[in-house]
Amino acid sequence: MVREEQPSFSPNTDSIPVDFSKIKVGKQTLEDATLNLGDYRRIDPRLGDKQAVLRAIRSGDLFKMREISNFFYKTSGIYSRLCRYIAYLYKYDWMITPFVVSDKVKPEVVVDTFNKALKYFDDFQIKRWFGEVALKVVRNGCYYGYIVRNGDQISVQELPPNYCRSRYEGPGGRPAVEFDLKFFDDTFTDTVQRMKILNLFPDEFKKAYILYKEGKLPKDFVGDTAGWYLLDIENTIKFNLNGEDFPAFISVIPAIIDLDDAQALDRKRMQQKLTRIIIQQMPVDKNGDLVFDVDEAQQLHNNAVQMVGGALGVSVLTTFADVEVEDMSDSNTTTSTDELEKVERTVYNEAGVSQMQFNTDGNLALEKSIANDEALMLNLLVQFEAFLNQVLLKDFNKNSKKLYFRAQLLPTSIYNYRDLADKYKAQTQMGYSKMLPQIALGQSQSVILASAAFENDILDLVNVFIPPLMSSTMSADVLDRNKSGSSTSSGDGKVGRDEKPDDEKSEKTIANRESMS
């Protein structure tokens, strides 16, 4: 007879033959009950898993980080709104200034060329295009484009960022863009469709693709792949944030995943609070014997189930044993902090953006936080301004020794444009530009000039709508009559300065007003 060896459970044993992750917790194993909480992981384990995101960030995998960023842009409301907030923070208000270098240039030539440049900018729809490009920069980390000229107009054909790179800079700091021609083979497997798509691209891409197929595009360095082609620097553009090509808020996504897990756990806790268990314990006599037999106990159990069967979250347990329910939480610790709010606050802390800008529940000042956000996008604003001068105004500056134009993007954001318009208006009184206040309010220079000419020259509104007379412009007789009929107090009887609107009052002022009411 062979004796069967029993497994040893000595503390000195290297491996314990028990898989504790398979222990059942309700209908789930222990591992599932503790880790499989969030929805992102269930939708796409490749992109919604926190460890996968951290690995992509750690390894610098730009392809994976862009894929993760776009996945969360579509599925996470917080991430989507954060990206759109930063991209549309600036209003991208622009103005063109002519520089007359030579006295031989006639004023009518300056005005004519200036109007053509304004129309050129209006037709390009700069504000809309800059907003769309900024959003793609925030989502993907960069934007690559190829300039296509159609007569007097230009358009920009977007290039896939995963098949573009930029390692050098040309004159004026313009990035030199290289394109991976494997894009056509990887994306379009059908030969006929591939040639149709290739014909939609500019001629430079067709010539480069032929060189690629003939094997005339060797690798540039050890570890490089064949197929990279350096495009004409005069026809390419690239934008990114602070010289980095990865998504700006990729580091926020792990905190968003934690928030999703915390929200799932919070929902489970809420469900647990709604759950009630009715425990009916069958009696036993003094000798410990059952008073009811098993069939009678089963009938009593079925009766109880039938009685509460329609109740929500109520279960019935019938047992002959003593039953106790233990609470895993520490009953000696009392806290008033909402744990879910702490996790949610972490998301915005990782982004470096104030949560109050999205969910305002007070009258706190956000100027410093907004100023930091504006500074984050200022580098991209400078790149956009260079694009206006190097690309859009290129044809207007061919004779720069006599006349040239410069474009400028105003630092007007959705938060500060009213204040800047007031400051520009104050400078107008000192002789500065009369256009700046209207440009800050969202009007283009062409609309400002056209409106002024139409109202003054055609409608003659300058003589129809006469502004009120002031003491500095009234005659002495009118001034004396006004003084004799005036009183020391204003007509409405108010004393002191006007009351501030509610959004400019401090929290203390609001609290005092509420206590008085």
Image (cartoon, rainbow, N blue to C red):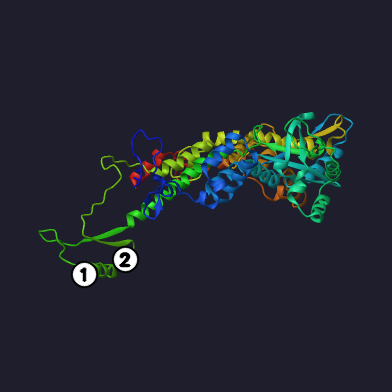
Measured as percent of width and height from the top left, residue 368 is found at: 52, 33
In the displayed orientation, state which residue is furthest to the front: 1
Q: Is residue 475 visible?
A: no
- Closest to the observer: 335 or 307? 307
State the residue in front, 366 or 464.
366
Mark 1 element type:
helix
Q: Amino acid at mark 2?
A: Ala
Where is residue 261 drawn, in percent x and y? Answer: 45, 46
> Is the residue 452 above or below the residue 14 in the image?
below
Question: In this view, which residue lies farthest toward the left?
Answer: 286
Rate crowding at label 2 as few (under 14), some (14 to 19) or many (20 or more) other CA atoms within 10 Å: few
Circle 1 sits on which residue?
A: 296
Residue 103 circle label: none
| In front of the other: 4 or 183 | 4
User: Quick check: 184 left or right of 288?
Assistant: right
Residue 44 in view of the camera? yes
Q: Quadrant of residue 208?
A: top right
- In three-dimensional space, the C-alpha distance between marks 2 and 1, rounded to whole angstroms, equals 24 Å
Q: Residue 94, how many percent across, how many down?
A: 70, 40
Residue that numbered label 2 is attached to: 311
- Which residue is located at x 76 percent, y 53 percent? 189
